[in-house]
Amino acid sequence: MSRFVILLFGLLINLSLKAQEFSFAPKENYTYVYSIDSSEAAQYFFKKKTPEFQTKIDSFIYQRPSLAPGYYVLASYFEPHIKYEVIHVPFVFIQVKAFNDLVQI
């Protein structure tokens, strides 16, 4: 009787482990958002030094989240290397509209 209970228990554990296959996992790569300060951004833009990814803010698959003003690194992993992009979110957006050669700010 105890062998039957152990066999049944082992079978239930085995089936529960195989219940969720990896096929349900998303196939797209995540993009991670890291915050950098202005001195690291200046070193990247002027000296082409790779920024350090230390302060993770967010991650996304499809749509970029709205970010507060500042400098950010968007990093994603594509085999066999990491692709990163340094972006600047400005404090003010200026729109210029022109209609019949009249410029409005």
Image (cartoon, grey):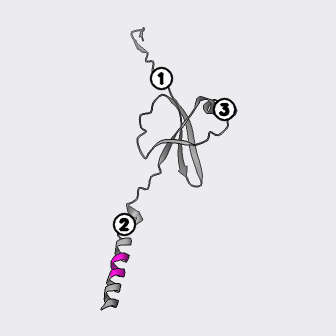
Is 9 located above or below residue 93 in the figure?
below
User: Measured along the vertical axis of the image, is residue 4 above or below residue 73?
Assistant: below
Instruction: Indicate the position of residue 102 as horizontal and vertical percent values.
Output: 41, 7
Q: What residue is rendered at 32% in x and 89% in y?
A: 2
Q: Locate residue 12: give its quadrant.
A: bottom left
The quarter holding residue 98 reads top left
Which quadrant of the rendered structure holds the N terminus?
bottom left
Tell me the element at label 3.
Answer: helix
Mark 3 = which residue?
A: 43
Number of numbered markers: 3
Which region shows up in magenta?
Answer: 9-13
Q: Amino acid at mark 3?
A: Gln
Q: Which mark is residue 91?
A: 1
> What is the spatial separation of the Cα atoms under label 1 and label 3, in whole angstroms?
21 Å
Image height check: is 61 above or below 2?
Answer: above
Q: Residue at x 58, y 32 (%)?
A: 37
Element class at badge 2: loop
